[in-house]
Amino acid sequence: MLLKTRWLTLDPYMRSGFMLQPDNVGKTVIGGTVSEVVESKAPTWQTGDLVVGFYGWQEYSVGTASDVQWNNPNMPIQKWDGSLGEPSTALGVLGMTGLTAYEGLKNVAKVQPGETVVVSAASGAVGQVVGQLAKIHGARAVGIAGGPAKCAFCVDEFGFDACVDYKAGNLGADLAGATPDGIDIYFENVGGDVLEAVIPRLNPGARIPICGFIAHYNETPTARRVNPLQRLRAEGLEVLGKDGNTKGYTFFTFSNLSSRHPDAENALEILSAWIKSGQLKYRESVTDGSSGYWAAGNSARRWCVSPADSRHSQCSATSIPIPSSSRGWIPAMH
């Protein structure tokens, strides 16, 4: 199949993994994509079909019906079902970020009505869904975000019960005020000082699904802090799910769910239904072509890792113009 990229994502994991590996210098930047089938010799794929895949930052790619996403044999490419939602949502609320929130809160932490759920990076693509899913399940949702605008976004737009601004300088006291009954579930996206403020508020039996720790992603081998898994282990918490434990912490990824079938498909149907009913809202930040990512003029090239500074550089001197019909997608505020 000849595929034309219509949507692609820019996500934090790129910086913490792909960008830091020297062997990736000069390679096309990885990333989730929604592509249109331009030509097909695959019987099950027709011209015009939309393919949810992992073809990276390039305008065109060649795919086969047996392709998988994330090098995971249990995650085949997906023919997008337009009845679920707009194609862009396949890379967000009905894709990696939505499934991450669903898996972490519902299947890992097993949220219950009346519990207090705290999520860091609350205005981000995952955090905004976590808070809303907490509310849908009858829990109290408290976000932690940076700045009054992001906190207002969480409360006014997504219905969080409260949001603590960690940049205000009173994180510990403000979090205590927002969680008078303690914290039953902490959905970890940040680590660092935010985690330190959360730990004293954890109730007995608390669950901590660890999605990421973005405060640590720019660390160098010579300057590393204790990560959330190490910190929580040092605090004496158990590993959630190990030996039947129903409390404690664990690291998970969205592939825990997206590689389980039909669980993944059922989760997408549920998330889609909540969007249609108005219970689940989402915000996308969209840019045309590559100019919104880096100052690259009005042309797009394959983006690759620069050996000089591990940022993006152009792989060749030949630019490929991206017409206005090609769209790029970036998760909402972090």
Image (cartoon, grey):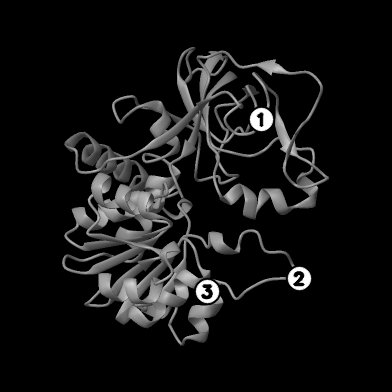
Viewer-nearest of labels 3 and 2?
2
Cα–Cα gap, marks 1 and 2: 31 Å
Cα–Cα gap, marks 3 and 2: 19 Å
Q: Mark on residue 295?
A: 1
Specify which label sits upstream in the sequence, 3 or 2.
Answer: 2
Residue 54: x and y in percent read: 57, 36
Q: Nearer the viewer, residue 85 or 122?
A: 122
Viewer-nearest of labels 1 and 3?
1
| Mark 1 surroundings: few (<14), some (14-19) or many (≥20) residues within 10 A | few
Q: What element carries label 2?
A: loop
Residue that badge 2 annotates: 222
* Residue 238 seen in the current view: yes
Q: In which quarter of the image is the N terminus?
A: top right
| Mark 2 surroundings: few (<14), some (14-19) or many (≥20) residues within 10 A | few
Q: Is mark 1 on a helix, strand or loop?
A: loop
Q: Report whether 55 appears left or right of 90.
A: right
Residue that badge 3 annotates: 229
Three-letter residue code for mark 3: Leu
